[in-house]
Structure formats: structure tokens, C-alpha cells
């Protein structure tokens, strides 16, 4: 079992710890609903130091990024971030990730914790561009400070103007008195905020300073439970649930990050899939009756024929109803289509809706 630099603090705060992607991680502190609401209305802090970070350096860095990722990284400028995925040779997804352009010859890739080894091997396999690859995961800590009050709460700690930062941009500078901190206007909650990368040795000091600065704003620590309900209300994919080695980006609704203006791993086959059309699609759905959908539950049409499976589901705290995502046969993917979710053997009514389920101001 691996531990982040904040493990002792989580235990002191009474967090319920669970194994996740090989790490001991907090699933909740005072409760998922309270932590969820703090992020939607105020500010919450997630320890996401389990994520992986790779630095790619050299003349061929962009060439490697372009070949292994589906999105077009050539449009990036210094200080910009891009969501992308690593296509599998057979049409599935190795991982989804963020691509940071540090400078013309330096990129940082942020990958999912469970896939660090797999992603590294995949990148290494295609590194015919003489790119220097550096895995900084073990020495990097990462806090996601999320919510509409995040910029206001954190501004006293930052020399850069947080309020002026555009979505999916980043800056390096002094933060909480520590130099060389990377502050990124990104997140996985749909409520705004920042992801803050820094050397592991500064972890407890930065945590302390963030919570001191956030105290007037009711800042709360938040765990994996709230992270999941928040991302699901936005319809964001979770690797291992909604996307994996068997799902193509086109089936998963990730055509917008699959750019055929360049050659990349399996691009020819994905181009054919786009032209022919997919046979199944990832859809969002809301429950029309009382019931909570869970991963693995079967989806049927109104006549009871099996048409798919739930990949993610929850009782949405902001919406007070069950929501979920799942793959269904293409004929049943249209918005408004009525479905049944089999919950403990009972057919419970649902309707296909277009994510995000939650919209700011609800």
C-alpha cells in the first residue's frame, strides 16, 4: 500500500481511509453530502497526490505527445492545458490524461494513479523521438482546491492573479511562500477551482496554509466519495468505469478530443469507426423513480430486452435523484429515450439525458 504525504493529516482529521489505485486514500471525512455541498457552494480540498506526473523533454517532445494522444497538442501554447486520451492499438483507451505545455520542448502529462506503470510502458514503446522521459510522480504532491470561492480563498497565498486565470491554463510561481509551485485552473468537479502541484517535501506546510487562508470561507477537506458524486453530476468519465481498454473514444462520446488532422496510435481504425458509426454509445440517464443505479446494473428497453450496462451511478446530492451513465445500443442513445435499470432484479424507470446533469445555479 502506498501513502500520500498527507496520510497523517487525513487520519488526524478522522477520515475514513480506503484502498484506491494502490494508495490508502480518504473516501470521506464528515460525510459525502456535506463535502459535496462545500465544493458546489464554497470551497473544498482533495488530496489527489496519487495521480501520476510525467515530464517529456527534448526536440521531439511534441512529436511523441502528438503520436500517443488523440487530441491535437500542436494548438497548445505555453501555459495551456489540454484534455486528451492515449488510444490503445486495438481501439480501446489506455488512459485519459491532461497535457501541460511547459515550453516548446517540455510537456507534463498527468495520468491516473492506477495506470502509471501501464502508461509509462505505453509511452516508452512509442518513444522513437529521442525524448527524455522523467517520472516525477513519487516526488510530487497534488491538491485540488475546488469550488466557487476557491480563487478568493487562495489569492492571499498566490503572487499570481488567480481570478484572472482562464479555464485550462496554468502558471508557475510562489505559492504559500514556496517557489516553483504549478497552479492550474483545472479540476474534476464542475465548480471551478485549481489544482496545485508542488514538491512533496512542502506538503504539510502548504496544506496548513491553504486551510488557514480558507477558514473564513468554510473550507472543508473532501474525499473520494464527494469527488465521484461531483464528477458524475457533470458527466465526466472515470477511467475503469466509463472508459477502459475495451471502449473506444468515439463510443464514449470523446470524439471532441479525437482529432484526425494528424496521425496517432490507431488513428486509421478510429477514422473508419467514425465513418461507419459505432454500435453502442455512452449515455447519461436520470432515474424517473426512486432507486440508485450502480456500476454493473443491467439496462433494458421498456419491453425488457437487455440493451446495455451501467458504468457509473449515484444518488446526486445536488439534484436529489439517481443519475448514471452506461453503454447502450446506439438505437437507444437518443435524448429522451425511456429505459429501465434493473436494481436488485426490479425494473426501475429512467430516461436518457444529455450531461451535464448539474448546471451552475441549481
Image (cartoon, rainbow, N blue to C red):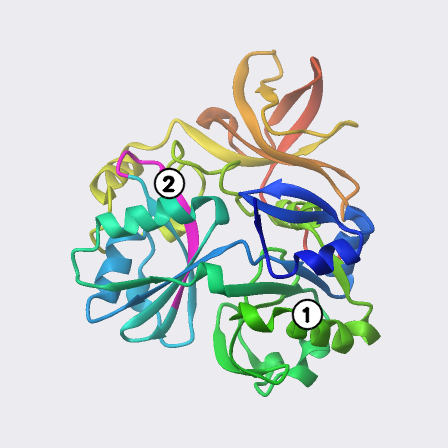
Residue 360 appears in the figure: no
Q: How far from the left and from the top, in percent, is residue 62?
A: 25, 65
Give the distance between the C-alpha atoms of the residues marked 1 and 2, in whole angstroms: 34 Å
- 87 relative position to 325: left or right: left
**Residue 298 occupies quadrant:** top right
Q: Residues within 10 Å of mark 2 (few under 14, many from 20)?
A: many
The answer to the question of whether label 1 and label 2 lie on touching residues, with beta carbons closer than 8 A, is: no
Q: Which residues are magenta?
A: 89-100
Q: How far from the left and from the top, in percent, is residue 287?
A: 71, 31
Q: Which residue is mark 2?
A: 93
Residue 112 appears in the figure: yes
Q: Is residue 21 above or below residue 170?
A: above
Q: Is residue 173 above or below residue 19?
A: below
Q: Residues within 10 Å of mark 1 (few under 14, many from 20)?
A: some
Q: Nearer the viewer, residue 136 or 192?
A: 136
**Residue 323 occupies quadrant:** top right
Q: Residue at x 69, y 85 (%)?
A: 156
Q: Nearer the viewer, residue 257 or 123?
A: 123
Q: Which residue is mark 1?
A: 207
- 195 relative position to 260: left or right: right
Question: Quadrant where the N terminus lies?
Answer: top right
Is residue 331 rendered magenta in the image? no
For the view shown, which residue lies furthest in the bottom direction?
Answer: 159
Amino acid at each position: 500500500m502506498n501513502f500520500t504525504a498527507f496520510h497523517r493529516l487525513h487520519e488526524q482529521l478522522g477520515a475514513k481511509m480506503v484502498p484506491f489505485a494502490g494508495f490508502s486514500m480518504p473516501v470521506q471525512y464528515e460525510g459525502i453530502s456535506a463535502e459535496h455541498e462545500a465544493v458546489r457552494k464554497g470551497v473544498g480540498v482533495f488530496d489527489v497526490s496519487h495521480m501520476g506526473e510525467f515530464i517529456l523533454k527534448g526536440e521531439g517532445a511534441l512529436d511523441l505527445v502528438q503520436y500517443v494522444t488523440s487530441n491535437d497538442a500542436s494548438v497548445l501554447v505555453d501555459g495551456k492545458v489540454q484534455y486528451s486520451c492515449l488510444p490503445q492499438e486495438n481501439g480501446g483507451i489506455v488512459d485519459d490524461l491532461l497535457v501541460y505545455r511547459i515550453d516548446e520542448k517540455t510537456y507534463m502529462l498527468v495520468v491516473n494513479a492506477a495506470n502509471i506503470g501501464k502508461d509509462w510502458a505505453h509511452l516508452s514503446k512509442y518513444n522513437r523521438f529521442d525524448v527524455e522521459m522523467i517520472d516525477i510522480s513519487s516526488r510530487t504532491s497534488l491538491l485540488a482546491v475546488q469550488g466557487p470561492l476557491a480563487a478568493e480563498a487562495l489569492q492571499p497565498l498566490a503572487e499570481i492573479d488567480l481570478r484572472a486565470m482562464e479555464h485550462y491554463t496554468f502558471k508557475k510561481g510562489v505559492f504559500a511562500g514556496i517557489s516553483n509551485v504549478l497552479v492550474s485552473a483545472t479540476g474534476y468537479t464542475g465548480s471551478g477551482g485549481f489544482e496545485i502541484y508542488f514538491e512533496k517535501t512542502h506538503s504539510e506546510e502548504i496544506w496548513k496554509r491553504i486551510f488557514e487562508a480558507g477558514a473564513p470561507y468554510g473550507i472543508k477537506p473532501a474525499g473520494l466519495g464527494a469527488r465521484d458524486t461531483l464528477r458524475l453530476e457533470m458527466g465526466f468519465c472515470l477511467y475503469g468505469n466509463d472508459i477502459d481498454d475495451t471502449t473506444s473514444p468515439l463510443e464514449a462520446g470523446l470524439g471532441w478530443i479525437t482529432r484526425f488532422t494528424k496521425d496517432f496510435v490507431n488513428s486509421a481504425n478510429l477514422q473508419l469507426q467514425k465513418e461507419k458509426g459505432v454500435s453502442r454509445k455512452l449515455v447519461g440517464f436520470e432515474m424517473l423513480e426512486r432507486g440508485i443505479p450502480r456500476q454493473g446494473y443491467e439496462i433494458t428497453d421498456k419491453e425488457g430486452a437487455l440493451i446495455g450496462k451501467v458504468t457509473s451511478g449515484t444518488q446526486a446530492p445536488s439534484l436529489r435523484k439517481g443519475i448514471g451513465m452506461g453503454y447502450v445500443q446506439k438505437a437507444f442513445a437518443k435524448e429522451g429515450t425511456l429505459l429501465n435499470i434493473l436494481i436488485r432484479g426490479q425494473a426501475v424507470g429512467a430516461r436518457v439525458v444529455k450531461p451535464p446533469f448539474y448546471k451552475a445555479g441549481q
